[in-house]
Amino acid sequence: MLKEKRTLKYFKVLSKEKIIEQFGLSKLQINKIDQYICKIKDYNYHTNIVGNSTLVDPWKSHVLDSIQIIKFINKKKDSILDLGTGAGLPGLILAINNFTNVSLIDSNIKKIRFIKSVCLNLNIKTIIYHQRIESLLNKRFDYLIARALSNINKLFFYSQKFLHEKTVLIFLKGHKVQDEINEASKYWKFQYKSYQSISDKRGNVVIIRGLNKINE
């Protein structure tokens, strides 16, 4: 296990205006994101798909948290799987930002219905799987991404069958990420770099390569 801790240079990019400027969002992209947020708020009135507290400043808690990972993805055409996508985060934010090969998977039918409705109404092109991660077979991806799904050891278990030799894993994690990495290193070989999140100073963006099960 190789490790490295880094802090992103543009840490205090927090306001909506600064996010738009930093990531060069077009008027169409801004409009789609605003509509997407409105749809999350409306849906949340009857079906909880995100925490209500995160909707106080959704451009910071959801948009910025999600959009920061585009800095770690090489090409817009690279294949991406959003594991346990929930309300579509971060996968839909990537798709709105012109990533053309984004897949989303979740076993919760209410969340999948919401995502399908958003994609249809806002003309967002994605591949959507309504099934458990364990049941998706014969697929390989360039990037695996996850946000608030599970601990790193469990994420590795989910991820292993989707890997090719150059697959990169990008996980948005909390302040206990080092404990999770230490636990996972008992069972897996991997290299990682950890960056401080720009949406929450307690959070981390963890980039993982070369994942292999120990003793395999």
Image (tube, rainbow, N blue to C red):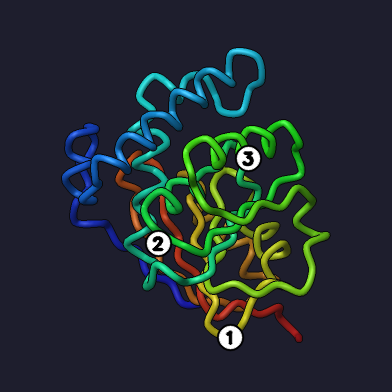
The answer to whether 191 is drawn above or below residue 200 in the figure is: below
Which residue is the site of mark 2? 194
Residue 125 drawn above or below residue 159: above
Residue type at mark 1 is Glu
Q: Residue 32 location in percent, x, y? A: 38, 37
Who's the residue at 43% across and 53% down the image? 94
Q: Badge 1 local density, few (<14 within 10 Å), some, or many (20+)? A: few
**Residue 87 marker:** none
Q: Nearer the viewer, mark 3 or mark 2?
A: 3
Residues marked 1 and 2 touching at CB (< 8 Å) = no
Instruction: Give amino acid for label 3.
Output: Lys
The residue shown at (75%, 56%) is 133
Viewport quadrant of the C terminus: bottom right
Q: Position of residue 198 (x, y in %)?
A: 30, 46
The disc at residue 165 is 1
Q: Secondary structure at mark 1?
A: loop
